[in-house]
């Protein structure tokens, strides 16, 4: 028997009882990272949320087939490899390895399959052929495009309609597209770029088709659950639906869940904005346990604003949890007797929270009440109560991964870095305030103060760039 679970389904914009196609079995796909650089803690949010879904479903008794891909063929990879004078496929392979190291540090449960684009070419080509055969794809000069108006349900996930989309798109004069919303399925090879033989000549896939092809390869034509960051809902997920449903002639996925952003200084943390903290820099300082804790201490659908307070709270809570798990190993029972009802109820309460759209924050709240209570009666625990204390710790560990290492290892790392929060705990609001002050100083020709501010930020490894329009942007030195 599996436990009932409700998921906020973005297809219907409603919280619904989760009913997989085959009772007790879940086909779950999550869009994974593009492997061109080290992952940042925004990417970590998407990874840890995917891991939470996988863990909760398993803890609730579902048999889960979980696919999380690597995008190892992409413009960003090609550009970066060119800069480094490296082969793009080798460059991507190197960063798949680096991503795996980061994921291990975050205590991720392995996915069932972790396919790469470069290893899925026959399935991608086959799917494009099916799309063309079914009247939704067309070929122009070695390029294959998806003809959006042929798919009448386009926009059903992002709730955009084709007319309003058309207004927002600038049509290039020499466009090969039949409709401005059409998107690329296959692009012809350019010199020096990785390419594969296809019925349309040598080339490589567009971005969206990989997920449709990988999902079908490992999970079949219809999935139970699909996840990704909220930025992927449009166009990526909308296009995945169009491709899969045009090719397979059946529904692609019944439930869509998206995690909100990790924000840094009121903006999305992203490599293109330069406001990123690498997973490994954070982990080196505080450990993966603290990062996972930050990410799961808010609901996945709520924005998470990165701040000193958020880190400090996670540091305190991780310490309390791991001290408790460590000391409770040595608790002695007073002998036979019934299980204390407060202790007995905790797993059920955490389960209720997790069954309510994966509310990890709510589950954590109940765990802390339990922790306080157990500590207050630790000398009066019956055998049954003590067993339940250990089982509760194990439930938190299995269902959320918030305990995934030896408590002593985690506590040692916390102790080592207790005092040193420099560089990682960069406060974006503080930076913006200094930049504003620097602007005023420069306007009043107070060059001394302007330089002082620049130096203060440089000492924190914040690099400033004065733009031609008079504004100043900043990024963390890599
Ligand atoms: P990318 O490598 O940019 O394709 O992103 C991989 C995954 O990380 C996607 O699911 C993105 O939505 C997610 N992601 C990227 N930046 C953030 C962020 N700041 N907050 C939350 N998720 C993010
Ligand atoms: Zn995807």
Image: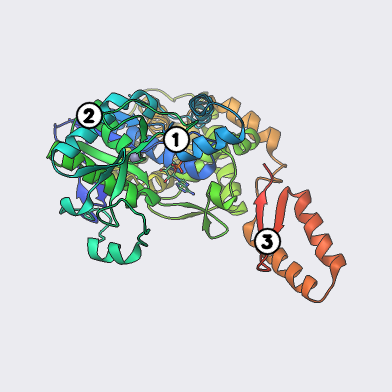
- Under circle 1, the secondary element is loop
Disc 3 CB within 8 Å of nearest ligand 1 atom: no
Whole-percent x, y for residue 216 in the image: 23, 31
Which residue is disc 2 drawn over?
A: 126
- Under circle 2, the secondary element is helix
Q: Is residue 111 left or right of residue 61?
A: right
Which residue is located at x 50 percent, y 35 percent?
Answer: 78
Q: Quadrant of ligand 1?
A: top left
Q: Is residue 117 above or below residue 358?
A: above
Which residue is disc 3 drawn over?
A: 430
- Nearer to us in this view, 367 or 116: 116
Marks 2/3: CA distance? 53 Å
Q: Is residue 271 left or right of residue 151?
A: right
Residue 306 in view (yes/no): yes
Q: Earlier in the sequence, mark 1 or mark 2?
A: 2
Disc 1 CB within 8 Å of nearest ligand 1 atom: no
- Please tell me how crowded label 1 is: few (under 14), some (14-19), or many (20+) other residues with Cα within 10 Å: few
Q: Nearer the viewer, mark 2 or mark 3?
A: 2
- Please tell me how crowded label 2 is: few (under 14), some (14-19), or many (20+) other residues with Cα within 10 Å: some
Q: Disc 1, disc 2: CB below 8 Å?
A: no
Q: Earlier in the sequence, mark 2 or mark 3?
A: 2
Image quadrant where one finds the N terminus = top left
Q: Is residue 37 above or below residue 114?
A: below
Marks 1/3: CA distance? 45 Å
Q: Nearer the viewer, mark 1 or mark 2?
A: 1
Residue 426 in view (yes/no): no
Which residue is disc 1 drawn over?
A: 190
Marks 1/2: CA distance? 22 Å
């Amino acid at each position: 028997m599996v436990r009932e679970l409700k998921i906020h389904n973005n297809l219907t914009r409603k919280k619904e009882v989760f009913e997989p196609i085959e009772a007790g079995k879940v086909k779950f796909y999550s869009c994974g990272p593009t492997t061109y650089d080290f992952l940042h803690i925004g990417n970590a949010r998407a990874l840890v949320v995917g891991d939470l879904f996988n863990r909760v479903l398993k803890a609730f008794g579902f048999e889960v087939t979980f696919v999380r891909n690597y995008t190892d063929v992409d413009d960003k990879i090609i550009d970066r490899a060119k800069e480094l004078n490296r082969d793009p496929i080798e460059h991507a392979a190197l960063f798949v390895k680096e991503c795996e190291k980061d994921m291990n540090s975050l205590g991720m449960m392995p996915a069932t399959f972790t396919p790469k684009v470069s290893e899925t070419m026959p399935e991608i080509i086959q799917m494009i052929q099916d799309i063309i055969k079914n009247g939704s794809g067309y070929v122009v000069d070695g390029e294959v495009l998806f003809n959006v108006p042929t798919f009448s349900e386009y926009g059903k996930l992002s709730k955009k309609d084709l007319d309003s989309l058309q207004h927002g798109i600038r049509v290039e004069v020499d466009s090969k597209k039949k409709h401005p919303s059409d998107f690329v399925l296959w692009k012809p090879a350019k010199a020096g770029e990785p390419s594969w033989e296809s019925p349309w000549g040598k080339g490589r896939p567009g971005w969206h088709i990989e997920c449709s092809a990988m999902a079908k390869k490992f999970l079949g034509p219809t999935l139970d659950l699909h996840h990704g960051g909220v930025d992927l809902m449009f166009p990526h997920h909308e296009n995945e639906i169009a491709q899969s449903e045009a090719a397979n002639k059946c529904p692609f996925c019944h439930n869509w869940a998206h995690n909100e952003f990790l924000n840094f200084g009121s903006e999305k943390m992203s490599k293109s904005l330069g406001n990123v903290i690498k997973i490994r820099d954070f982990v080196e300082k505080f450990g993966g346990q603290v990062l996972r804790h930050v990410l799961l201490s808010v609901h996945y659908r709520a924005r998470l604003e990165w701040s000193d307070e958020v880190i400090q709270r996670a540091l305190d809570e991780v310490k309390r949890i791991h001290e408790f798990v460590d000391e409770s190993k040595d608790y002695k029972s007073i002998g036979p007797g019934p299980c204390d009802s407060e202790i007995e109820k905790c797993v059920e309460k955490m389960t209720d929270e997790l069954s309510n759209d994966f509310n990890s924050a709510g589950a954590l709240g109940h765990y802390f009440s339990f922790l306080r209570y157990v500590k207050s009666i630790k000398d009066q625990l019956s055998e049954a109560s003590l067993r339940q204390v250990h089982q509760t710790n194990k439930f938190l560990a299995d269902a959320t991964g918030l305990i995934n290492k030896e408590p002593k290892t985690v506590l040692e790392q916390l102790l080592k870095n207790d005092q040193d929060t420099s560089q990682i705990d960069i406060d974006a609001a503080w930076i913006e305030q200094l930049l504003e002050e620097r602007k005023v100083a420069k306007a009043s020709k107070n060059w001394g103060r302007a330089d002082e501010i620049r130096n203060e930020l440089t000492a924190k490894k914040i690099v400033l760039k004065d733009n031609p329009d008079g504004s100043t942007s900043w990024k963390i030195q890599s």
